[in-house]
Image (cartoon, grey):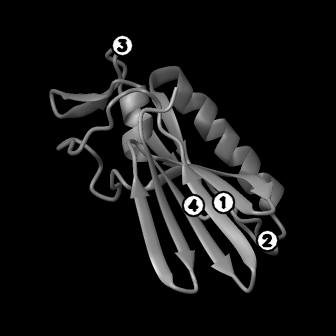
Amino acid sequence: MLQWTQRLRLNHSGWRQTIKHGTWVLVASVAGSSIVASECASSATAPTELTCLPPNIKLADIVSAKLVQTDPLVIEKVTVAQKLAELKADCKNGKLVDGAGNEIYLYMLTWCWGNPPPNYQQILQQQEAELETLRKQYTVIEMTCNPSGLPIS
């Protein structure tokens, strides 16, 4: 269930904004084509500040972006704040933990290549091995390397 929705619409006359609650949807009209980006939120309240968040991570950073539709272009995005709200995250003893008390690890995925390097399979295998090890000790949030959600070519 979505808790909030915000819509922004771009057309030849400029921006028009309609605010509801929670998730934002961006609709842009470019040369007659509509482009929509949406961000889906769970019913949990997203945190506005967590002092134990790693310094290189912002609550507005994108955890996942998924191409939902191509005409008009619709992309669903989930932010760190939304994911942490879903996990009922909090700071305990200076560590970021989920609602069950398990420490949270934010992992930046590697796989966004237009033209992959010769050893890309080795890189992906190493990444998966690292993730398997981390999942045994942490609640792992896998951060996309493609926050736009658009296909990489």
Q: Which mark's residue is nearer the viewer, 3 or 4?
A: 4
Judged from the image, the secondary structure of the residue bearing numbered disc 4 is loop
Q: Position of residue 24 (x, y in %)?
A: 47, 53
Residue type at the position of mark 4 = Pro
Q: Which mark's residue is nearer the viewer, 2 or 1?
A: 1
Judged from the image, the secondary structure of the residue bearing numbered disc 3 is loop
Q: Quadrant of residue 10?
A: bottom right
Residue type at the position of mark 1 = Gly
- Residue, x 50% and y 46% (percent of image)? 107
Q: How far apart, in angstroms, are the residues tagged by discs 2 and 4?
A: 21 Å
Please, is residue 82 above or below residue 8 in the view?
above
Residue type at the position of mark 3 = Ala
Q: How far apart, in angstroms, are the residues tagged by discs 2 and 1?
A: 21 Å
Q: Report the residue marked by disc 1.
A: 149
Q: Which mark is residue 100?
A: 3
Q: Which mark is residue 117?
A: 2
